Image (spheres, rainbow, N blue to C red):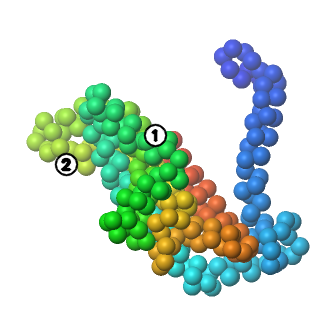
Amino acid sequence: MLRQPATSTQITHLNRLWLYVLCGLVIVFLIAPTLLVIPMSFSDSRYLSFPPESWSLRWYRAYFGSLEWRDATVVSLQAAFLTTIVATVTGTLAAYGLHLARSGAGRLVQVALTLPMMIPVILLAIGIFLFFAPLELNNSLSGLVLAHTVLALPLVLISVTAGFKSFDMNQEMVARSMGASRPRAFLTVTLPQIRNSVISGALLAFITSLDEVVIGLLIAGGDKATLTRRMFLALRDEIDPTIAAISSLLIVLSIVLLAVSQYFQSEPRD
């Protein structure tokens, strides 16, 4: 198997063995610290330790039994669901309009919408905090959703734009030529054929909102504190092993959602 060609240039897998080993080491280096949190979450110790001296579900029970942690989880899930709806609808419509525009101005708008991916999150957080202050949106669910939408929108836009590249707009034109309005043609002809890209973008938006912490530190306080914000503050004030249990749950959830997202991206369109 190692002597079989890996590419059309007849380079064998054996010749590329060093590259496979190097990539494997890089992956282990990046993933191992994250995966170490999972066994630490099953420790019975009052402090974070690896390897665990004894195994227990103590910190998972502490998480589910804490009103403070549950309230923060509810806020994070509410923000994530609402962000997913707002970012998916807005990002899909933006991708649709930009796909039809095909002009220099459209490309500039697309760059502007994807800027949040290139700007450091701390700068975005400071700007959003100052912008929200006179509007009294800080420490509110609506402000949190709007802020998270800024981060999630580029991901939805990129995902849906990729879906439009493999869609023939003539099909929508045929529907409109037969009397369908543009909104109806989009909903009945276009959207069903790009649904995988839309779903993938929605899942990425949900993950982005659920995992975001920097913006939450500035604009999500009081009873609207997110789960990741409370985790950061708990880690700063005291090393509470409950954080390891919560982190493990978030890791598993993120992996599952990313796997579902990849499935929809790779699934062939009908």
The amino acid sitting under disc 1 is Pro
Residue 54 appears left or right of 245 = right
Q: Nearer the viewer, residue 68 or 264?
A: 68
Reply above or below: 260 against 106: below
Question: What residue lies at 26% left-to-right and 32% top-to-bottom?
Answer: 101
Question: What residue lies at 39% left-to-right and 36% top-to-bottom?
Answer: 111
* Disc 1 packing (10 Å; few <14; some 14–19; many ≥20): few
Residue 105 appears left or right of 235 = left
- Residue pointed to by mark 2: 184
- Residue pointed to by mark 1: 268
Q: Nearer the viewer, residue 10 or 212?
A: 212
Reply above or below: 66 against 78: below
Residue 136 horizontal/vertical position (percent): 35, 69
Residue farthest along the top direction in this orientation = 9
Q: Label 2's element? A: helix
| Residue 6 showing in the rendered view | yes
Mark 2 or 1 closer to N-term? Answer: 2
Q: Label 1's element? A: loop
Residue 223 horizontal/vertical position (percent): 47, 79
The amino acid sitting under disc 2 is Arg
Q: CA distance from mark 2 to mark 1?
A: 24 Å
Reply above or below: 242 against 262: below
| Residue 82 showing in the rendered view | no
